[in-house]
Amino acid sequence: MDQENVHTGHPTSGDYFKIAIVLVIITLIEVGIFYIEQLGRWMIPILLVLSSGKFALVVMYYMHLKFDNKIFTYMFIAGLVLAISVIMALITLFEFWG
Amino acid sequence: MSQTHTPIHGEEETTSTGLNHRKMLMWAFLGSDCMFFGALIATYLVYQGKSLVGPYPIDVFDIPVTSVSTFVLLMSSMSMVLAYAALTKGNMKVFRIWMASTAIMGATFIGFQIYEFSSFSNHHVHIDCMNQSHELTAYEQELYDSGCKDGVDHIDSDSGLKPKTNLFGTTFYTLTGIHGAHVSLGVIWLLSILLLSFKKGVITPEKNLDVDLAALYWHFVDIVWIVIFTVIYLFGVFPGF
């Protein structure tokens, strides 16, 4: 972190590049894991964790939620939690009563 | 809280929360759009594997191609955040370069999607009834069982995957099509801002909220794709899912 983020609290351009590299590496790992057949069903939780990591990096740093007012975080998380709840509820509903 | 918080983006606000109403509205919209895409993803997942006829995901998905389009969209997010950073530092020339590259990468992603949709809808299957060089997928086996009879040496099918073909086609095209519409809208928005930045006093380092809101929207379409790429594409081809 250099001079520019001392004033704004934001990451620098260099930090954004580093985050982009991490995002690309995670994507490459995802695609690589996809071709490892020995992982079997373990592939699903591993890919979910990696995907969640990418999601969190973009939201926290590129969308600045880590540095912005917490009210924005609550508004977004509320929608996200509801969305995940709908997905889980529908899957459960169709799995057991579909 | 609102008394002690200094807004990072744009000017000081005199609202009851101390936050800009337009930015608040954008976050409320993004939260609601999460639910919208959540419903579409849920619909895709509950109908996964319930199609009565092919083609199925394993027949049409091309993971290397989709990985490249995912890479392009991720890079567009990086260029968007760099455009915003350049604007806040007052470097208009760099801002415009990054904005243009973001829009170009967004348009490239749309190009990939058009190619993908076209490729899926024209999916061609050739089955040699006499000599199988590879293991047949479930769809190919269906075609083999119904078409490979005495005297037939090969089968060609051009039925492809269309929205009306099966449940997979309907849910897949609805989900990815709506995401593509979001990206297209984003590209138009970014290009509008790029054009407005040439008009004096409209987009300035101090008046950066319009760019901030467009950036939030653009990153959102990126994170939605992160989920779609994993849950629809990677899981879609995985036989154990």
Image (cartoon, coloured by chain):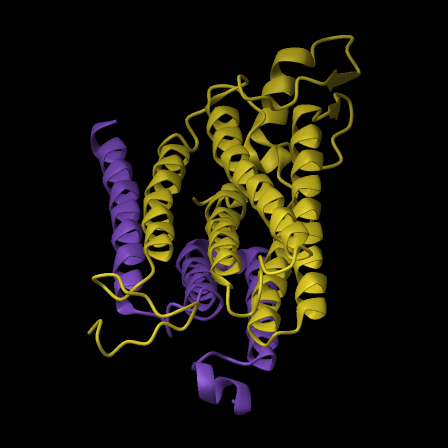
Chain colours: A purple, B yellow
Pick out the residue farthest to the front: B200
Q: Nearer the viewer, residue B88 or A79?
A: B88
At x 36%, y 72%, the residue is: B7
Q: Residue B55 vs residue A51: left or right?
A: right
Which x, y percent locates residue B169? 53, 26
Image height of B112 relative to B153, above or below: below
Image height of B225 relative to B179, above or below: below
Q: Nearer the viewer, residue A2 or B146?
A: A2
At x 55%, y 67%, the residue is: A26
Q: Nearer the viewer, residue A73 or B127?
A: A73
Number of numbered discs on residues: 0
Image height of B33 relative to B145, above or below: below
On the question of residue B90 being in view, the answer is: yes
Which x, y percent locates residue A86? 26, 41
Q: Quadrant of the C terminus of chain A?
A: top left
Which x, y percent locates residue B189? 58, 46
Q: Quadrant of residue B102?
A: bottom right
Q: Residue B2 vs residue B67: left or right?
A: left
Q: Residue B7 vs residue B181: left or right?
A: left
Q: Quadrant of residue B75?
A: bottom right
On the question of residue A32 being in view, the answer is: no
At x 31%, y 61%, the residue is: A72
Q: Quadrant of residue A60?
A: bottom left
Which x, y percent locates residue A17? 61, 75
